[in-house]
Amino acid sequence: MARKPKQQRSRATVDAIIQAALIAISRQGPGGTTAREIAELAGIGVGSLYEYFANKEAIFNAAAERFVADTVAMVQPLVPQLVRMEIREAVVTLLRSFRDFLEQNDQLYLKCARHAFAVDMAVYQKPINRMLMNLFSQYLMHQPHMTRVPRIPALAFFYINGSTFTMIQHLSEETPSVPFDELTGVLADMLACYVEQHLADDPS
């Protein structure tokens, strides 16, 4: 059987290391994860691990980048649909899609995000928040009447940061006190009511 080209084998090894790091983080968080455990999960020796990454922190950074890239890849196909929706429907659709994404692969990303937020790993949250701010800007371009709503930057900051944290917290609970659909409905209604109220006050 023909051997894989070296570059292709290297890429496969890097992917295996990143996947192993995500699995390890999902189990006990970055603080409890060792390089040896990552190497064992990846099916390589510790020495081989350091042929591809300088240290454990570099592996964690690569895992964070994978998480962010996959999150962005999940949202991007939704953008053309979201920006044309009424604000309440757009919020519910986005949050449901985010939930489904986090719960894939035996909740791998949800468990990683849970640990990441617990230790304030901003490397996970900030790039995703930037992507959501960009989505909000595109929404305003397609819904120009929304620009009449006051304090839009503060509104976007509050809902993007608040809803992301709230979703992670809710999905991390084994027995949530409220159903997911009720929570998303409240978040969507709060934003929609704020927008509708101020548009009604300024119908110009």
Image (tube, helix red, strand yellow):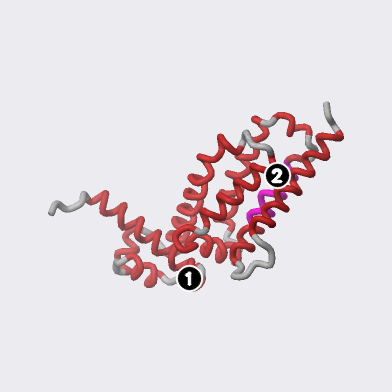
Where on the picture, by quarter, is residue 154? top right
Residue flagged by tag 2: what amino acid is it? Ala
Residue with the mark numbered 2: 156
Q: Looking at the figure, which quarter contains the N terminus?
A: bottom left
Above or below — where is 39 with respect to 198? below
- Residue in the picture at 69% in, 43% down: 88
Label 2 packing within 10 angstroms: few (<14), some (14-19), many (20+): some
Outermost residue toward the top in this view? 204
Secondary structure category for the residue under label 1: helix
Please check the rendered image and state whether residue 161 is part of the magenta-colored stretch, yes or no.
Answer: yes
Magenta region, residue range: 153-164
Outermost residue toward the left in this view? 1
Q: Main secondary structure of the magenta part?
A: helix
- Residue in the picture at 17% in, 53% down: 3
Say whether residue 7 is left or right of residue 18. Answer: left
| Total marks in image | 2
The tag earlier along the polypeptide, 2 or 1, is 1
Residue with the mark numbered 1: 27
Secondary structure category for the residue under label 2: helix
- Residue in the picture at 51% in, 69% down: 29
- Residue in the picture at 57% in, 64% down: 114
Label 1 packing within 10 angstroms: few (<14), some (14-19), many (20+): some
Q: Horizontal and vertical percent for residue 145?
A: 74, 30
Above or below — where is 160 with respect to 54? above
Q: Horizontal and vertical percent for residue 59?
A: 43, 60
Say whether residue 192 is left or right of residue 25. Answer: right
Residue flagged by tag 1: what amino acid is it? Arg
Where on the picture, by quarter, is residue 167? bottom right
Q: Horizontal and vertical percent for residue 55?
A: 41, 63
